[in-house]
Image: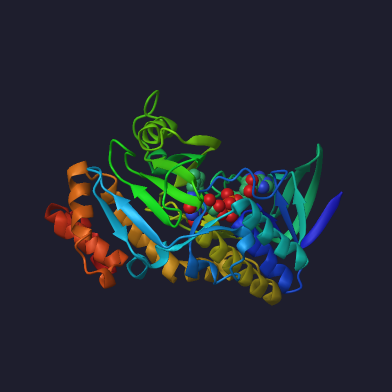
């Protein structure tokens, strides 16, 4: 059986959902395939997002907002805690989502706009014609069928294989994959309106521990650590267990997730003939925070808009799709990714003494002035010796 569409979207995460919705709203035929049996589960996310980032896409809805966050705290290795109040915390003040509901809502909106959606439907290979992607082979319920599409969007997340099968190098260097573990914990003593970030090489080498509240006494407590030592005692879950034992000895664990986040540079090119790559599949998660929900939604929508224009012009070659690649790179998101990659490269090498100095010095900043730029300036002030390493950052300052 052969099916034909204007567009095929591989992956039903935020990137794929926004792509499918955007194309369907333009009246074109679109098919979204998701390999999991249910959209949004299992959740592999701490579920945090800045408020103003979301409003770009859909109005806030209590059914997918677990908690509204009003403040954040940054805890240094020496346990000194600095509070980021709303007016200084900028986009970090936001929501902790219920992604099981949120992801479903996004795909539902795509379906409502006219997209055909298939779950437990896995893309197993691209269909290649004259060296260009022309659709995919899909496996569903033990059956295999071909889907022909004029354009394909690879939105298959961190585990993305589709672009590689189509000939694009998507390898993430091992040292640039943060390994993550997260518990959903209940019965813990937390401020339900505050997110917390714990730094330190004993706590989370080349990463951080997060506490993202989801209600009274309920929170995602997770960790991401950089590629380095491995083996017993050094896995992300081992560090998390030590943190939880110290911080929440009475807490109950009701869910465990593990996953990876890429903290590398984005793919050098995110388009090919008849194909665009979005979100985590394009390695667009933030190298400092690991956040990628917004980036996936933004690039999913932008890729779809570019593809629609190309379809209308009757030319879906790599050259015709390049405006997508060019536009996200010069966007606020693209510039932040470039700057934050450079900062991350310095951050992962900092000793606990330097991390302490930085957190203490940031705490003294005039609250109204807080921004990523002031953070970087303080980082340099606290570590004059880093000035040389950071000299390539001057263009961002
Ligand atoms: C532990 C952890 C915590 C995180 N916390 C945050 C956070 O607090 N805030 C934030 O913004 N980001 C966070 N992230 C990152 C965030 O989850 C991702 O950036 C975001 O989900 C990317 O969206 P996406 O649509 O690109 O990919 P995904 O959401 O991963 O969706 C990709 C989909 O493609 C499907 N798929 C894969 N291969 C195929 C195939 N061959 N055929 C069909 N379907 C396929 C997958 O099943 C998946 O559903 C976190 C990540 C982790 C691991």
Color style of the picture: rainbow
Horizontally, residue 194 falls left or right of residue 282, namely left
Quarter of image, res 225:
top left
The residue located at (64%, 49%) in the rendering is 40
Q: Is residue 6 among the parts visible in the rendering?
A: no
* Circle count: 0
Query: Residue 339, position in %: x, y?
Result: 33, 61
Q: Which residue is at the far left? A: 384
The residue located at (47%, 36%) in the rendering is 251
Q: Which residue is at the far right? A: 1
Q: Is residue 230 shown above or below 395?
A: above
Of residues 216 and 387, the one nearer the viewer is: 216
Quadrant occupied by the C terminus? bottom left
Horizontally, residue 106 falls left or right of residue 272, namely right
Q: Which residue is at the far top? A: 232
Q: Is residue 224 shown above or below 8?
A: above
Quarter of image, res 105:
bottom right
The residue located at (54%, 72%) in the rendering is 56
Query: Residue 266, position in %: x, y?
Result: 45, 55
Q: Is residue 146 among the parts visible in the rendering?
A: yes
Of residues 219 and 42, the one nearer the viewer is: 219
Query: Residue 55, position in %: x, y?
Result: 54, 71
Q: Is residue 189 shown above or below 311?
A: above
Query: Residue 345, position in %: x, y?
Result: 30, 50
Horizontally, residue 200 falls left or right of residue 115, namely left
Q: Is residue 15 shown above or below 58?
A: above
The residue located at (12%, 56%) in the rendering is 384
């Amino acid at each position: 059986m052969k099916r034909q569409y204007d567009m095929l979207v591989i992956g039903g995460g935020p990137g794929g959902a926004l792509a499918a919705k955007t194309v369907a709203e333009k009246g074109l035929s679109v098919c979204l395939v998701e390999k999991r049996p249910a959209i949004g589960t299992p959740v592999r996310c701490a579920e945090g997002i800045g408020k103003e980032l979301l409003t770009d896409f859909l109005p806030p809805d209590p059914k997918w907002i677990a908690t509204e966050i009003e403040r954040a705290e940054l805890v240094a290795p020496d346990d000194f805690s600095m509070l980021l109040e709303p007016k200084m915390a900028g986009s970090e003040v936001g929501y902790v989502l219920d992604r099981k509901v949120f992801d479903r809502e996004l795909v539902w909106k795509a379906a409502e706009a006219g997209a055909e959606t298939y779950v437990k439907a896995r893309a197993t290979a691209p269909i290649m014609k004259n060296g260009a992607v022309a659709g995919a082979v899909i496996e569903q319920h033990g059956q295999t069928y071909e889907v022909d599409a004029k354009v394909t969007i690879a939105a298959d997340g961190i585990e993305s294989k589709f672009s590689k099968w189509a000939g694009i190098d998507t390898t993430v260097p091992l040292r640039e994959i943060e390994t993550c573990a997260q518990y959903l914990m209940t019965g813990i003593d937390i401020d339900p309106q505050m997110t917390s970030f714990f730094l330190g090489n004993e706590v989370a080498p080349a990463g951080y521990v997060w506490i993202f509240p989801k209600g009274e006494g309920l929170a995602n407590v997770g960790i991401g650590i950089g590629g380095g030592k491995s083996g017993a005692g050094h896995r992300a879950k081992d560090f998390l267990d030590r943190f939880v034992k110290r911080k929440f000895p009475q807490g109950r664990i009701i869910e465990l997730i593990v996953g990876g986040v890429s903290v590398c540079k984005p793919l050098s090119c995110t388009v090919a003939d008849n194909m665009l790559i979005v979100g985590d599949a394009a390695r667009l998660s933030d190298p400092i925070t690991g956040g990628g929900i917004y980036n996936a939604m933004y690039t999913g929508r932008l890729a779809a808009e570019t593809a629609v224009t190309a379809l209308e012009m009757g030319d879906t070659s790599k050259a015709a799709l390049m405006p997508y690649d060019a536009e996200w790179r010069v966007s606020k998101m693209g510039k932040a990714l470039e700057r934050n990659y450079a900062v991350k490269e310095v951050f992962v090498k900092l000793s606990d003494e330097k991390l302490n100095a930085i957190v203490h010095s940031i705490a003294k900043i005039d609250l109204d002035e807080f921004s990523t730029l002031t953070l970087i300036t303080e980082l340099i002030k606290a570590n004059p010796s880093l000035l040389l390493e950071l000299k390539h950052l001057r263009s961002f300052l």
